[in-house]
Amino acid sequence: MKKIAVFTSGGDAPGMNACVRAVVRTGIHFGCEVVGIRRGYEGMIEKDFAKLKRKDVSNIIQMGGTILLSARSEQFRTKEGRRLAYENLKSEGIEGIVAIGGDGTFTGAKIFMEEYPDVNFVGIPGTIDNDLYGTDFTIGYDTAINTAMAAIDNVKDTANAHNRIFFIEVMGRDAGFIALASGIATGAEAVLIPETKTDLDALAHFLTQNHEHKKNANIVVVAEGDESGGAFKIAEEIKSKLPYKADIRVTILGHIQRGGRPTCMERVLASRLGLEAVKALLDGKKGVMVGQIHKSITYTPFEKAIKHHQRLNPVLLELVEILS
């Protein structure tokens, strides 16, 4: 294999640039030309390609976001769009591709390989949600939870100063990993996540008890995908259930969780997965996601990574209940 490509797709995640850097430099180390595809599958269709040398990925390991940009591609969902992408890859002489992203990225790669089996894909898990099966941690998760933790700590200071209840919404439309980790780390009174049923009556009772015991501030961390609704809706419902007049505020952390400098752990993980993905391509592996479980590199078929989701550790749920 003489020429490989790399792209980032789906939601951006801190550490993607460190991963791109590792892919480029590993590919060059093993004698490959490396092409960067800008804007994910959309760039593949529009032939938005750029040859990458070592110097092109200098001084990016500490940067959030992705220098290759990311985009959703409706065209790639069509056979015609995928045909255009294939023709562009073949005209460029690209034989293997490292795809950094999540479920949607790997689904697209799986379908593409079924139609055009002469182009090999290897995936790297890049998503702040940490919900992909086949790896302990995804690229972006560690930075996101540290960003959320720092923000919640700041909110907690002002909550204590004014005797307030804060509902803080973090990202996690389908998974509660960010909410659970940041909630435990900040001593939140409750964590509401999609994986467990939310009992608003029980939460109102708990907050009322805290009020009676003169607890100054209460923090409730809400994953955006909780079945009871977002933080604003839940806050309104809780306010109506409390037997006392509470000073309730809502904070939506939003996209600050996607940005920022990746943590040390993030950079190391991204670098290792980038290196291993290139080695996997050169060893003839395809249609797999490279992950790390118990510090060992693993290879999970796309189909399995897409169909299964990482489960929350029940011990962490118990921690919230006991320590709140």
Image (cartoon, grey):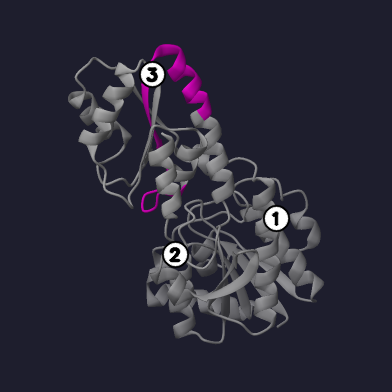
Q: Which residues are magenta?
A: 153-177
In-image side of 311 versus 20 (left or right): left
The type of residue carrying mark 3 is Lys
| Mark 1 closeness class: few <14, some 14–19, many ≥20 residues within 10 Å | some
* Residue labelled with disc 3: 215
Mark 1: which secondary structure?
helix
Tell me: residue 266, above or below residue 157: below
The location of residue 71, given as percent across then percent down, is 48, 56
- 3 and 1 marks in contact (CB < 8 Å): no
**Which residue sits at x=44%, y=74%?**
304
* Residue labelled with disc 2: 103
**Which residue sits at x=80%, y=76%?**
31
| Mark 2 closeness class: few <14, some 14–19, many ≥20 residues within 10 Å | many
Q: Residue furthest top?
A: 162
In-image side of 314 versus 16 (left or right): left
Tell me: residue 13, above or below residue 9: above
Relative to the observer, which residue lies in front, 251 or 211?
Answer: 211
Could you tell me if residue 40 is visible in this image? yes
**Which residue sits at x=70%, y=76%?**
279
Relative to the observer, which residue lies in front, 187 or 231?
Answer: 187
**Which residue sits at x=40%, y=20%?**
217
Give the spatial CA distance, label 2 vs label 3. Answer: 42 Å
Could you tell me if residue 51 is visible in this image? no
The type of residue carrying mark 2 is Asp
Residue 156 in magenta? yes
Tell me: residue 273, above or below residue 195: below
